[in-house]
Image: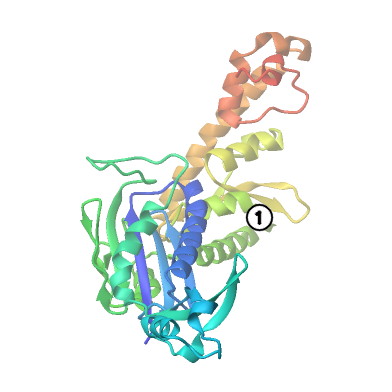
Amino acid sequence: MAKDFLLEIGTEEIPAKFSPGAMTQLKEQVSKRFARLRLPFTELNIFATPRRLALLVTGLEEKQGYFKKEVKGPAVKAAYDANGAPTKAAQGFARGQGVTVEDLFVQELNGVPYVFANKLEPGVETQTILPQLARELINALHFPKPMRWGDFDFYFARPIRWLVALYGTEVVPFEFVGLESGRVSRGHRTLATELVFLGQPSDYREALRKAFVMVDPDERRVEIQAQLKVLAEQVGGEVPEDHELLSEVIHLVEYPTALLGKVAPEYMNLPEAVITTPMREHQRYFPVRAVDGTLLPYFITVRNGDAYAIDTVKAGNEKVLKARLEDAAFYYREDQKVPLEGSAERCPRSVRGYLNTISLVLPGMPCRCLTRGVW
């Protein structure tokens, strides 16, 4: 009877840009290793949040599939007599492989015909394979900037804090970096104070949802897009598609709640790029535009939590953005005081400050140090 298998690697907060690659690696490793081990399954799902990587395998068979192996026996001239009857050599070979003489077949090897047998080797219990397999899957993951912790000679994206491994209703027991696998997960860091006990893998998504964690990135994507649309429509605008920013924000939160903030009006006369770049690059905010594409004095950000004290959070984000835009406006005004001919001579100090603030070069800035890449 097939059962479901769950492996969750609980960690400190993983950088958002690491998660998509880790999910791809995990899926590839599972597919490759399960095929090699002859472990058929029905469906594979990979999940990731800032505090976890997980795989949920549905319908994993309780035992390896039989392994069909071609075994070479004696040469045909030794296996059959002049009348074509099997000799003792053929009979002994067939008996040793657990087949009948009639099951033997002939193949040539380097021009010499030999008898062969298809030997079926029975598989072992899945439960006995999973502990080592779980360790191998964790070890196989690689990250752009891994780290080690404690006295462990092991590198991962961030320190591992808990491990969940279940096959059906049973724990898959194994030890890794000083941790014992179990059935206890963690919910949202601030919204869920109780541990999450899992009876079986199929409970995973709903149990974590009750603990304010959406484990499926695709579900978080749909939820964030819906919230962006609702908030933007409140001010007669829309949020243009921004796949790169959305993909990053998805992996910054476990329980997304979007909020609408205002851009201080005194900064709306700045060039558009000066306004939107601090929003996107520094704060991970979504600019709001009118239907005709005009930039509106609003932004939307996504909080990792619920709507508690949302007005305070909104005010804080508006304050941070105002400080960013004030810096950008200062450097923009300073650059305008110098003729274009003199801009190249003032580098790199003013340009360095400008770039640190808004991470861009406005069109028409003929800067030698920028073209030489020395900032």
Q: Position of residue 204 (x, y in %)?
A: 36, 72
**Disc 1 designates what residue?**
239
In terms of image quadrants, where is residue 132?
A: bottom left
**Image height of 271 relative to 305, above or below:** above
Whether residue 124 can be seen here: yes
Q: Position of residue 233 (x, y in %)?
A: 65, 61
Image location of residue 291, percent across then percent down? 75, 56
Residue 89 falls in which quadrant of the image? bottom left
Residue 269 on image: x %, y %:
70, 34
- Kindly indicate the quadrant of the structure image that contains residue 346: top right
Q: Give the SS element for disc 1.
A: loop
Q: Amino acid at mark 1?
A: Val
Judging depth in this view, the residue of 11 and 67 nearest the camera is: 67
In-image side of 277 versus 168 (left or right): right
Measuring 42% from the left and 66% from the top, which residue is drawn there?
55
Residue nearest the observer in this picture, 299 or 213:
213
Residue at the front extreme, as displayed = 82
Residue at 71% across, 20% down? 371
Residue placed most toward the observer, 42 or 250: 42
What colouring method underlies this structural image?
A: rainbow
User: Relative to 367, is 318 above or below?
Assistant: below
Q: Quadrant of the C terminus?
A: top right
